[in-house]
Image (spheres, rainbow, N blue to C red):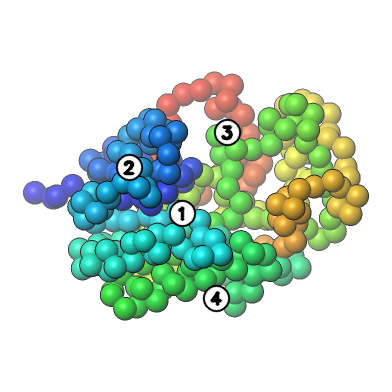
């Protein structure tokens, strides 16, 4: 008889929320951490067991897991999971089948619109990107010391239900910021879940995967497509150097690159449900107007 698997998620975020139903349908147990009581209901709604951390005792439930997912963001002090749990995770390593670390394509830095793949040298240009490079290296160091079956997933810009341009277009706050040669890669959250599931089914310790769709595109094109789908006027076009933007928003425009995703297809056999933003936004709007339970698997 096959024993049921257990996934422990450090930081039960947007991606874990969409991965969890796939696993629950196959008899898994999923536990996820949240920093406060506010996240407990969201975790339960996805079918997982919530734990408040830091602050709660997680040693026992973590000790029952044979899979780990880490999505907690690092900061200037490093990765928060490693800071508090590195020794415990190292002790668990012999019984772990898969560990996934969610990173970002920001580790590649600015490439002037050029292509990057998983072999491209890391050259982050933002503070967040530098934090991720350090965190990746720290996780790889732990994996090398204790045989941790680590897999790194470098995620492009994430969109999906509740995260997209429609709300801003509808309330007339969307703008088409124009910056020459500016392109972003993106990925629908459901396709992230499918990539993680494929890796869990086909583990390859040490592997690194870019997770993005097939079409890097200027951000103003995405806004324009959303407006057309809604039948609304195009939001105003504003040159980047004239745009009033928050430091966070400006940081996203500091990097321009096209990200290759060949490895998730050739090594994991993933076929993207949403291969470009046009398909993704069209399906998001359909689901919004005609909500139905997800039938993807």
The answer to whether residue 141 is seen in the rendering is yes
Q: Residue furthest top?
A: 290
- Please, what secondary structure does the residue beneath circle 4 have? loop
Which residue lies under the disc numbered 4? 119
Mark 3 to mark 2 CA distance (whole Å): 24 Å
Q: Quadrant of the C terminus?
A: top left
Q: Nearer the viewer, mark 4 or mark 3?
A: 3
Marks 1 and 3 sit apart, C-alpha to C-alpha, by 20 Å
Which of disc 4 and disc 2 is earlier in sequence?
2
Circles 1 and 4: CB atoms closer than 8 Å: no
Spatial CA distance of label 2 from label 1 is 14 Å
Q: Which mark is residue 72?
A: 1
Q: Choose between 105 and 79: the one closer to the eye.
A: 79
According to the image, label 2 marks what residue? 51
- Residue at the spot 74% in from the left edge and 26% down from the top edge: 170
Q: Position of residue 245 (x, y in %)?
A: 80, 47
Whole-angstrom CA distance, mark 2 to mark 4, is 37 Å
Horizontal side of residue 226 vs 194, given as left or right: right
Rendered location of residue 41, percent (x, y) = 39, 30
Does residue 107 appear in this view?
no
Q: Residues within 10 Å of mark 2 (few under 14, many from 20)?
A: many
In this rendering, the answer to whether 86 lies above or below 62 is below
Counting from the top left corner in percent of width and height, residue 17 is at 42, 40
Q: Which residue is mark 3?
A: 162
Report the front residue among 51 and 139: 51
The answer to whether 176 appears left or right of 65 in the picture is right
């Amino acid at each position: 008889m096959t024993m049921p698997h257990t996934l422990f998620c450090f930081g039960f975020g947007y991606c874990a929320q969409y991965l969890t139903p796939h696993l629950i349908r196959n008899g898994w147990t999923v536990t996820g951490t949240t920093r406060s009581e506010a996240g407990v209901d969201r975790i339960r709604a996805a079918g997982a067991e919530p734990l408040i951390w830091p602050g709660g005792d997680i040693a026992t439930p973590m000790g029952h897991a044979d899979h780990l997912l880490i999505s907690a963001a690092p900061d200037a002090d490093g990765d928060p999971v490693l800071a508090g749990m590195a020794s415990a995770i190292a002790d668990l390593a012999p019984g772990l089948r898969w560990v996934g670390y969610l990173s970002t394509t920001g580790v590649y830095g600015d490439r002037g619109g050029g292509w990057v793949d998983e072999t491209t040298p890391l050259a982050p240009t933002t503070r967040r990107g530098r934090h991720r490079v350090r965190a990746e290296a720290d996780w790889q160091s732990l994996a090398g010391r204790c045989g941790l079956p680590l897999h790194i997933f470098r995620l492009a810009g994430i969109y999906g239900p509740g995260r997209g341009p429609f709300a801003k277009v509808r309330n007339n706050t969307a703008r088409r910021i124009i910056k020459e040669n500016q392109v972003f890669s993106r990925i629908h959250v459901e396709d992230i879940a499918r990539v993680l599931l494929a890796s869990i089914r086909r583990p390859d310790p040490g592997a690194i995967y870019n997770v993005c769709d097939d079409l890097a595109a200027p951000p103003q094109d995405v806004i324009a497509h959303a407006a057309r789908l809604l039948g609304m006027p195009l939001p105003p076009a504003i040159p980047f150097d004239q745009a009033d933007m928050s430091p966070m928003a400006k940081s996203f425009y500091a990097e321009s690159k096209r990200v290759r995703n060949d490895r998730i297809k050739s090594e994991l056999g993933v076929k993207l449900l949403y291969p470009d933003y046009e398909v993704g936004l069209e399906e998001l709007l359909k689901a919004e107007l005609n909500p139905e339970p997800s039938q993807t698997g």
